[in-house]
Every structure is written in structure tokens, then in C-alpha cells.
Image (tube, rainbow, N blue to C red):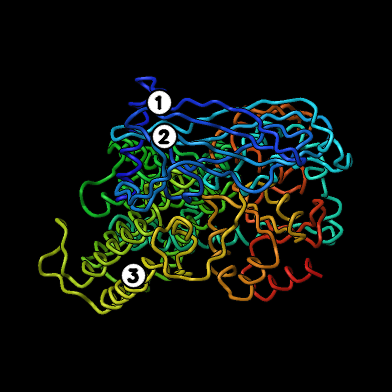
Amino acid sequence: MKKLLTIWMLMVAVVSAKAQMMDPVHFTTQIKDLKNGEAELVFKATIDAGWHVYSTGLGNDGPISATFNSVKMDGAQPVGKLQARGKEIKQHDKLFGMEVRYFENAVTFVQKIKFTKAKYDIECYVEYGACNDQACLPPSEASLKASGTASQSQAEVLPEQQPTSAADTTSQTSTTSPTSNTSLARTDSQASSLLWAPVISELQTFNGNSAPTENMALWLIFIEGLLGGFIALFTPCVWPIIPMTVSFFLKRNKDRAKAIREATTYGASIVVIYVLLGLAVTLLFGASALNALATNAVFNIFFCLLLVVFAASFLGAFEITLPASWSTKIDEKSESTTGLLSIFLMAFTLALVSFSCTGPIIGFLLVAVSTQGSIVAPTVGMLGFAIALAIPFTLFAMFPSLLKSAPKSGGWMNAIKVTLGFIELAFALKFLSVADLAYGWHILDREVFLSLWIVIFGLLGAYLLGWLKFPHDDDKHRTNVPQFFLAMASLAFTIYMIPGLWGAPLKAISAFAPPMSTQDFNLQKTVTEAKYKDYEQGMAAAKAEHKPVIIDFTGFGCVNCRKMEAAVWSDPQVADILNNKYILISLYVDDKTPLAEPVEVEENGQKRTLRTVGDKWSYLQRVKFGANAQPFYVLLNEEGHPLAGSRSYDEDIQGYIEFLNKGLK
């Protein structure tokens, strides 16, 4: 809440500052020769009364730090970090909740450089933040351009020594931004450089020309659909229909064999109807659109609101029903027709009548599998759902005596609906979290997300124990034994999540909770987190430190990425290798940060435009490594060549350690 309030106040202040076109900081720049092959880039500022400019190195969670950024460094390279000179003021800022350092009236920022050629051509800028008591400026820049001939002592520098690129200025660049402006503006030229050169054949050689498949993922989706169908069976809209429908078929035909055939056909018709629904979703969106849904803010917020509506329906606020005229007309049509068409129309009537209970479950299933990015996922999920829904009709038709032993409908079915309502409410937060991460809003950071889940599952436990009631609950209903055990599980899960507020990894829900990096308060000492979120910067650091590189192609909305981080990266041995023996670079393919300028590239004979940071990293993964799924891990040397095969989602810790050691060897 505190961070949300801070962001809101800063947004209001920025809008106010832009509206009034404030210009409270005035810079003069110069290059100062130090006569020893070195020089200083000087950015001298005078600050209007009442305003202040923030100093360097304030960290990620504070105000905008002053940072040095190079656009062009031909014939020179930065030495050390950006220095701030002047009367620095230290003060605890209540808005940011931390100690900040800033300057009033005047400040001079100095970046030392070393000449590497007789002639130099420099283009650079200092990015800074300024505030007063009422408003803050957006990140602002003071630019410096200089070119000329170095002095005699400077010209004696070895000509073959190459200037450091913008990526080498990692220590001078703000860590709040995943990429530098230079690297963003030059993607097309980088694609032809050594670091962007394709290594697909090398990876295939290491991998044995094998690629990971998605069969297991589709099997999991099928099982999820099957589970959803079995849950739907035990809702008040579906379960009572089963004995009525089966009895109808048995009475309709004195020949029991024919009745069984028709009931089996009825079950098959249910499967066809729901599979057609899955196909409709697939054809409606298409593969590329389904991939885009995974992190698109509008769709994720829409899905969140949709699940909230479904949850409210299950909790008893209202019933989601299709027009009664639809089911009536179809029912009349089924009675007036004969053969397979009449049975199919009766199955369609069942789908419409039971929609108030199956609709939210189907909606949740389709939402979940659609954002997996697979074109066949919705169809596979609905196949599992339909099979589970059709099984009891076929079994009870074959063995009518089972109807006598089947449990009767009652209050226990309403308890299932309410339980599903709580679960859908919890998963609605997952979709809101994906949009929040992709766009960097920081509304639903990890501790906020966990707090809401703790409340939701705590209330679910209270409901199952009878401490909480909804309008359609029976006042005389008592907690039965199954409900008691479910309540125990829900309350135990609630207690399990509480330590997560202080940084416990919570591996069981790592796929759903936001990453640990979004948590403000963390008592956990060992955290595996990438120091670099920019490819060029990370590779420059590897070259400087003579370390191998592991690139982690990931995404804010990537469920399996969070599982790997919680289950594998948290292992002490894995964490030690990643933190100390490799340069870890995490590239988020769904980062919606706009590029400084859109970049046109050609891929597979077609031109496309890269507009966001995520577009850039997704393009890198496809062009250089021939992959587009996440998580995707690849080990490189400092020249950008593979050291071993690639690795994707696999929670085998020992296998991951062997993978890392292979790169080190």
C-alpha cells in the first residue's frame, strides 16, 4: 500500500510538472583535459530555489539517481563511476521510506575518461531526477558532444586498443532500467555483430539435434480439463440431471441394449459439443494471439474481472444463465427429430441448462490454457473436460443399478460451488499479477499478493467449518467430515503462506506468486537474482571479469520460470554457481518497456518492427538460438558461443548442476 501511494503521488506530480513545463535545472557542459591521456566530462548544474537534484547510486527503490550514459565513445572509454561534487544533503524521505542524497542550488557531475585514439568523437549524457515539495520532473537528460584531436601525450595510446562500448558502462548506468538507450536504438546493427550471430547449429550439436517437446504440457492440460469436468459433475446444475437423463433413455427404449447405445451416443455428443467449443476458441484467437494474451494488460485485466464475476456467481451473488428460450427451443427440436440429431440436440440442451455451473469452470479452464500460447491447448483442455462430464451418463446407462447408490443432491453441492468461487477469486489475482509485472506497475507485489491469498484461503477454511455463511446456504447445515478435512487443508495452506511475507520461498505456489524480486521486505539472505537484464551489458561484464555467461530467457507471466526459480535456483549449490561462477543475465521477453526508437528487422523474409524491450529479447532468442519458449537457459562464452546444450523447464536439481558444471569445464 505504501509503494502504491508513492507511485500514485509521483504520477500526479509528474503530470503536474509536465503541464507547467518546468525547467528548474540548468546545465553547462565541457570536456576538461587532464594532460595525462585522460580527461573529465563535466556537467555543471545550477538549480532553481526550492528544487533539488538527486545524487548518484540511490538504488532501485528510491528516486531517480544521476547516471552516466554513453551514446558514442569513439577514441575514449569511461574510467570509474560518475562522481557528484557539491554540498550533498542526506535526509530520510518519508515518501520513499529511505535515506536519500541530493543537492540544492548547484551540483557538478564528473565522468572521467581515458583516450584510446589520437582522435576522439564523444556523445553522452547524464540522466537525473529533480523534485521540489510539490512536484517531480520525469527523468531528464543533460547532453554533451565533443570531438577533436587528443594532445601529444594522449596520442601515444596504442591505436589497437578499442574503446569501451555503451554496454561496458554498466557501473555508470542506472539499474532501474533493463537496457540502455544505446543498445535499444541499435538492434539492427547488433543482429549482424558477433554477439547476435546465430549459433543454432552449434546448439543442435550439443543437444544431439533434439528439441524439447510440449507433449507433457498438453497431457497436463488434458488432466486439468479432466479434473474440471469431474468437479463440474458435483455441482447442483449437473449432478441432478444425470439420473433424470439416464432414466429417460432407459424408459424410452424397452430394449436395454439400444438404450445403452443411445446413452453412449449422448455422452459422445457431449464430448463433441465441448471440443467444438475449444476449437472455436482456438480458431477465434489463433496461435500468435494466444501468445500475446499471456502478458497483454487489457486481456489479463479482462480475465481477472471475468473470474471475479464467475466467483461472485458461485458465491451466490447472482446466477449466470443463458436465455431460457434457447434451451426450450432446442429441447422442442430434439423431441421433434429422430436419430442421432435428436440425441445431439438433447446433449446441447444439457450444455445450456447446466451453463450456470459449468460456465465459470469452462471459462476458467479456457482462460488458463489460452494464455499458455499453444494453439491446441484449448481443444485438449475441453476434450478432458467433456470426457469427465460424459462418463457418468454412459456408466449409469450401462449399469442402472448404480443410480440407487449414487449420492443425492443437497447442501454439499452448494459447498462445492462456494469453494470453487473462492478458488476462482484467488486465480483472478494471478492474471492481474501478470499484467502488473509486464508493465511494471508494482500494484500487486509479492507481499500484497500473498496477503490477499492468505485472506481468501483463510475465509474458505472458515466457510467450510460453518463460521461463514452465504445467502443460499442452509442455516441448519452442519460441517460434514469431508468439509472438515478440506477446511483443515485450507487453513493449513493459509498458515503455510504466512512466512512468505518475510521472504520464505513458498515453492508450492511459486508458479502463481510474483517473483521474489518484487518483495520489499525479505529476511532471506541468499537470493539468486540476475544482476543484468540487458544482453550487451551482461556480455561486457563477462568479458571484463573473464566469466562464462548463463542467459535466462524468461517472462513475467511465465509460470514454469517461477517454478524453476523457486525449486531449482533456491538450491544452495545451484545458487552458489549462478551467483559466483557465472554472469547471470535474465531477459524478459514480455517486458513492455518501449524501445527508445522502434527498430525494423527482417525475419524469415518478412519485415517486422520491434517496439518493446521484450520484442528485442524475443527476437534475439529466435534469431540467435532458434527457440521461442520460456524458460530457456543457454551457456555462452564471452564471445557469444555455446559452451553446452540448452536447457528448458526441468526441476531436476542434480541435472541442472551437471548442466552448469558442463559449461564451466
Of tags 1 and 3, which is closer to the observer? 1
Amino acid under disc 2: Ala
Q: Alpha-carbon neighbours of circle 1 within 10 Å: few (<14), some, or many (≥20)? A: some
Instruction: Write down the residue under mark 1.
Output: 24
Instruction: Write down the residue under mark 2.
Output: 130
Q: Alpha-carbon neighbours of circle 2 within 10 Å: few (<14), some, or many (≥20)? A: many
Question: Given contact means CB atoms under 8 Å apart, are the residues at marks 3 and 2 in contact?
Answer: no
Residue 178 visible (yes or no)? yes
Q: Residue furthest left?
A: 475
How far apart are the alpha carbons under marks 1 and 2?
A: 8 Å
Tell me the element at label 3. Answer: helix
Instruction: Write down the residue under mark 3.
Output: 498
Amino acid under disc 1: Pro
Tell me the element at label 1. Answer: loop
Split into 4 quadrants, where in the image is the C terminus?
bottom right
Q: Position of residue 168 (x, y in %)?
A: 70, 46
Image point (32%, 31%), residue name: 50
